[in-house]
Image (cartoon, rainbow, N blue to C red):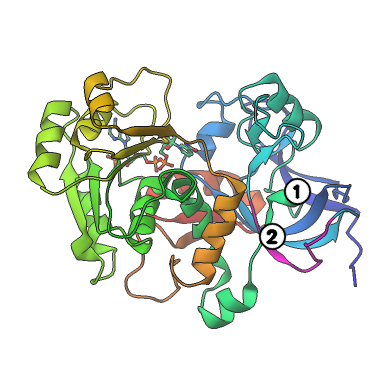
Amino acid sequence: MTTPLPPTHRALRQDVYAEPPTVQTVATPQPTPGSAVLKVLQAGILNYTKDVYNGVRKHPYPVPLTLGQSAVARVVALGEDATTLKIGNLCLLDITIRGRDDIDRSAGATFLSAIVQGFTPASARLMADAWRDGTYAEYVRWPLENCYVLDEDRLFNKLGYQMGDLMYMTKLMVPYGGLGSLCMDLKPGETVVVYPATGGFGSAAVHLCLDLGAGRVICMGRNVEALEGLKSAATPEKRPRIETVPLSGRWEEDLKVLKSLGGNIDVFFDISPPTAGKEVLKAGMVALRHGGRMCIMGGGDQDIPLPNGVFMHKDLTLKGKWMYEPMDVKRLISLVEAGIVKLHRQGEAVTPYGASVVAKFSLEDWQKAFNEGERVGSAGIVVFEP
Ligand SMILES: NC(=O)c1ccc[n+]([C@@H]2O[C@H](COP(=O)([O-])OP(=O)(O)OC[C@H]3O[C@@H](n4cnc5c(N)ncnc54)[C@H](OP(=O)(O)O)[C@@H]3O)[C@@H](O)[C@H]2O)c1
């Protein structure tokens, strides 16, 4: 039976770009064709969420806006065209919203809910006119195809996870977009370099590679202490498959170290921020084996220096990836539900680096929440429980 939606609900909203948001009581969203309305249980806060909404990151987005991020939520109402979703389903909400009439993506009608309106007029229009509001609210209206049903019985009763453990999936989803079968297709036994390995998505990539069966995971980073932390956060049986490489930022030196490790490198995975040196990618490309693959998920507008001759003679593959495909999300959830890719489990002695929820906030405490997200950085997950 459907419980009637309350006429109003609380949402963290910004009326003027880059100005402080406020918790407002607004009309509860109603289901329309193509959408579900969900009760938000937990919504993530990134280390740079504060800088998105205070304008430092200069992300373009329309206002007024309900702020938000990836979330775990429960379906409370459905548009009449829902075919598989049911009232009561627990869902992972994917923030990558795509134009339904942009099948080949030629219009670039893709944006990240409540974070950035995308990079074309079509994506900006889609966000402003159709899917403006994010998950920092008690209720959210969400595209049906972005609600991924989770098997609660399997996750909670059989695998022993708790609600907060599920949020790590939203971190794993990004590197899975680059490393999964639709992009790099990382295979068991392969050697992969993760650059840099110490950030939120980098450390998730390391954990993912290990669970997907990579033979060796070479972790590059400039922070030696963080690299060691990453290694000690892996379970004892996985630890020997992790190697760490302190970063010099000069490609010849980084190449020398990569070569000194010996063996073939099958995949180089880049998830560097715009501020990080891109010279490392040259070292990575030269270090790859014949037929090796490189995935660029790192951000930035600068040119990347790549060695033409090496690229051609070694039959290398270079792919870029923004976020992930819908099938990646389905596959990652299946891998988690099968117990192959592991989440943090509360109370376990050894947990993947940065995989556990370390702080929970109400919407009213948004300032503390954003500061805590920044302070915790990649070492944990901070959430709102609206
Ligand atoms: N393609 C996509 O779909 C996609 C999606 C999300 C994010 N991204 C990209 O991924 C990047 C990382 O995101 P995140 O959330 O993991 O960030 P994060 O948690 O802030 O981690 C940043 C990482 O970069 C390292 N780093 C920072 N400045 C550096 C520098 N100057 N030289 C070398 N390493 C440096 C940090 O290492 P230290 O420990 O040394 O500080 C850390 O490992 C984002 O900035 C974005 O560009 C791409």
48 relative position to 291: left or right: right
Quadrant into which the C terminus falls: bottom right
The residue at 38%/75% (across/down) is 348
For mark 1, what is the residue? 142
Which is more toward the observer, 327 or 241?
A: 327
Q: Please say if 46 is above or below 116.
A: below
Q: Residue at x 90, y 68 (%)?
A: 2
Magenta region includes residue 86: yes
> Looking at numbered disc 2 in the image, what kind of residue is underneath it?
Ala
Q: Position of residue 337 (x, y in %)?
A: 54, 70
Residue nearer the viewer, 357 or 81: 81
Q: Quadrant of the N terminus?
A: bottom right
Q: Amino acid at mark 1?
A: Trp
Look at mark 2 in the image and give the residue it sits on.
73
Q: Which residues are magenta?
A: 82-93
Residue 301 at what x, y percent from top left? Answer: 43, 20
Judged from the image, the secondary structure of the residue bearing numbered disc 2 is strand
Asked whether residue 177 is drawn in magenta, I would say no
Image coordinates for residue 134, horizontal then vertical, percent: 69, 43
The percent coordinates of residue 24 (x first, y second) are 77, 44
Looking at the picture, tell me which residue is in the foreground, 310 or 109.
Answer: 310
Numbered disc 1: secondary structure: strand
| Lower sequence index among marks 1 and 2 | 2
Contact, CB < 8 Å: mark 1 with mark 2?
Answer: yes
Q: In the rendered view, does 234 fall on the left or right side of 328?
A: left
